[in-house]
Image: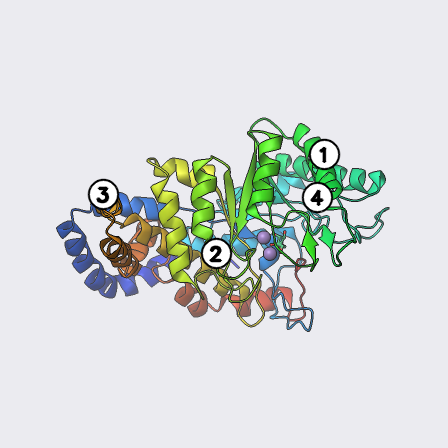
């Protein structure tokens, strides 16, 4: 299944009149505020969000799984799926792999396929939270923090192997998320577990190519429910600081206790040049991995507001941070869900670009919280959908990606090609 320029052109032709009717008044309105529309549209168009290879199938929960059919059965098919998304929105030009769920066997062919679909490889993720077949030592009681040197060594070697796989594909970052921790008070010596983790990470860091980064992800609980070895951004930041300049923190939006001020964490990390990347998703209760922007779009906007606050150079912001989604799908078609997530992320970015920064700063300096709030909310409440649509049309993407996806019957075609009883590797 391929989406061609012909498909896009026909779809966009039909959308043209309606689009112009909403875009032109917005241009006038922004003009009135002294906002230049062209550079804004360019910024929105160039912003790319990586798709996780593990979110292309219907995930389910530990209680059940309801396959949707047509799910990708191997890495080539996963890349093909991301290619479909990118053809529709021209905003998902990267894929993030999870090893060993995605072992690139024929690297030359994998690279060629990605290139043909205009995709690059974002951060590669290691997996020491599950035991694989034929694995010598178990990770039941941890990996990089394990009490047994042999287990730690195995986990370190796995991470080094992941770097090697990534290097063959042109990735530039390794994301490490550890399930290590404990379920009961007294089970684990906190200090020893953290020290061992740090030592293991140092061994991995030593193998990191010069132009690579290691991104350390944190999570407060799950699968361990009493303690996690890297539970929060402070611990990740501490480890990244000890490792060196190539180590940074990765913020998965779902990995916070309820009501945590994530935008403030983002501000601090970016100020310290330790913000490495994101796993975007949304949640109401915990690590729900719901569609980004589905529950707390204002929080997402406030995060982008802090990111923009901390930069003078948007290209720098776009290139120096790994922008990735980390979501799971139980009831939606995963491809539709990912289109919606990318859209929500770009909406938050566009709205944050509209913030009257000078006005906001003056209001802050004058201790005028009412004015500061209305400046932020004025940007948040702007309807930026015509800007996103214009950015897509200019990039030769579909005016309405989800609509075209449905009109073309992409899922049905995938089911026809791959069958209805498919399981994608991943969560
Ligand atoms: C852990 C996590 C981490 C894993 C992914 C599958 O909850 O967010 O990023 O690699 O899920
Ligand atoms: Mn994650
Ligand atoms: Mn998670």
Tags 3 and 4 touching, CB below 8 Å? no
Label 1 CA crowd tier, 10 Å (few <14, some 14–19, many 20+): some
Is 380 located above or below residue 318 in the figure?
A: below
Q: Measuring from the top left, give residue 402's x and y in whole percent.
A: 42, 65
| Rendered image: mark on residue 199 | 1
Tags 1 and 4 touching, CB below 8 Å? no
| Rendered image: mark on residue 85 | 2
Side of 309 relative to 252 (left or right): left
Side of 358 relative to 425 (left or right): left
Q: Measuring from the top left, give residue 305's x and y in whole percent.
A: 35, 49
| Total numbered badges shown on the rendered structure | 4
Q: Nearer the viewer, mark 3 or mark 2?
A: 3
Question: Does the residue tagged 2 have its C-beta within 8 Å of any atom of ligand 1?
Answer: no
In the picture of the structure, the residue carrying the numbered disc 3 is: 358
Mark with earlier residue (4, 2): 2
Mark with earlier residue (1, 3): 1
Tags 3 and 2 touching, CB below 8 Å? no
| Nearest the eye: 253 or 228 | 228
Marks 1/4: CA–CA distance: 31 Å
Mark with earlier residue (1, 4): 4
Q: Measuring from the top left, give residue 280's x and y in whole percent.
A: 50, 54
Q: Secondary structure at mark 3?
A: helix
Q: Identify the residue at image location x=40%, y=39%.
A: 317
Q: Is residue 289 visible?
A: yes
In the picture of the structure, the residue carrying the numbered disc 4 is: 105
Tags 4 and 2 touching, CB below 8 Å? no
Q: Nearer the viewer, mark 3 or mark 4?
A: 3
Q: Nearer the viewer, mark 1 or mark 4?
A: 1
Marks 3/2: CA–CA distance: 37 Å
């Amino acid at each position: 299944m391929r989406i061609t320029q012909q498909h896009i052109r026909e779809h966009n032709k039909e959308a043209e009149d309606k689009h112009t009717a909403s875009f032109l008044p917005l241009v006038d309105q922004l003009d009135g505020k002294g906002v230049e529309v062209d550079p804004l549209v360019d910024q929105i168009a160039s912003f790319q969000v990586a798709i996780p290879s593990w979110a292309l199938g219907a995930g389910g929960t530990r209680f059940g799984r309801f396959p949707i059919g047509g799910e990708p059965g191997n890495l080539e098919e996963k890349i093909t799926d991301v290619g479909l998304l990118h053809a529709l929105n021209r905003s998902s030009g990267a894929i993030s792999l999870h090893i060993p769920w995605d072992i690139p066997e024929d690297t030359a062919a994998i690279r060629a396929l990605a290139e043909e679909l205009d995709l690059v490889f974002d951060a590669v993720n290691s997996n020491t939270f599950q035991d694989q077949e034929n694995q010598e030592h178990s990770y039941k009681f941890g990996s990089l923090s394990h009490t047994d040197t042999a287990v730690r060594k195995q986990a370190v070697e796995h991470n080094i192997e992941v770097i090697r796989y990534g290097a063959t594909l042109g990735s530039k970052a390794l994301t490490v998320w550890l399930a290590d921790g404990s379920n009961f008070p007294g089970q684990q010596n906190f200090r020893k577990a953290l020290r061992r983790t740090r030592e293991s990470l140092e061994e991995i860091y030593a193998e990191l190519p010069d132009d690579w980064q290691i991104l350390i992800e944190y999570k407060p609980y799950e699968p361990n429910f009493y303690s996690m070895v890297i539970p929060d951004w402070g611990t990740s930041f501490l480890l990244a600081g000890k490792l060196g300049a190539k180590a940074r923190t990765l913020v998965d939006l779902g990995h916070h206790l309820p009501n945590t001020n994530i935008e403030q964490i983002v501000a601090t990390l970016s100020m310290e040049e330790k913000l490495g990347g994101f796993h975007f998703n949304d949640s109401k209760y915990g690590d729900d991995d719901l569609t980004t922007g589905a529950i707390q779009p204002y929080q997402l906007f406030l995060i982008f507001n802090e990111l923009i606050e901390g930069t003078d150079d948007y290209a720098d912001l776009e290139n120096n941070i790994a922008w990735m989604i980390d979501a799971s799908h139980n009831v939606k078609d995963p491809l539709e869900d990912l289109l919606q997530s990318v859209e929500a992320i770009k909406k938050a970015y566009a709205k944050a670009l509209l913030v009257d920064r000078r006005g906001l700063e003056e209001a802050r300096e004058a201790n005028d919280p009412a004015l500061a709030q209305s400046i932020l909310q004025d940007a948040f409440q702007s309807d930026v959908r015509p800007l996103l649509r214009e950015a897509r049309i200019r990039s030769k993407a579909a005016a309405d990606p989800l609509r075209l996806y449905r009109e073309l019957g992409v899922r049905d075609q995938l089911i026809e090609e791959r069958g209805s009883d498919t399981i994608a590797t991943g969560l």
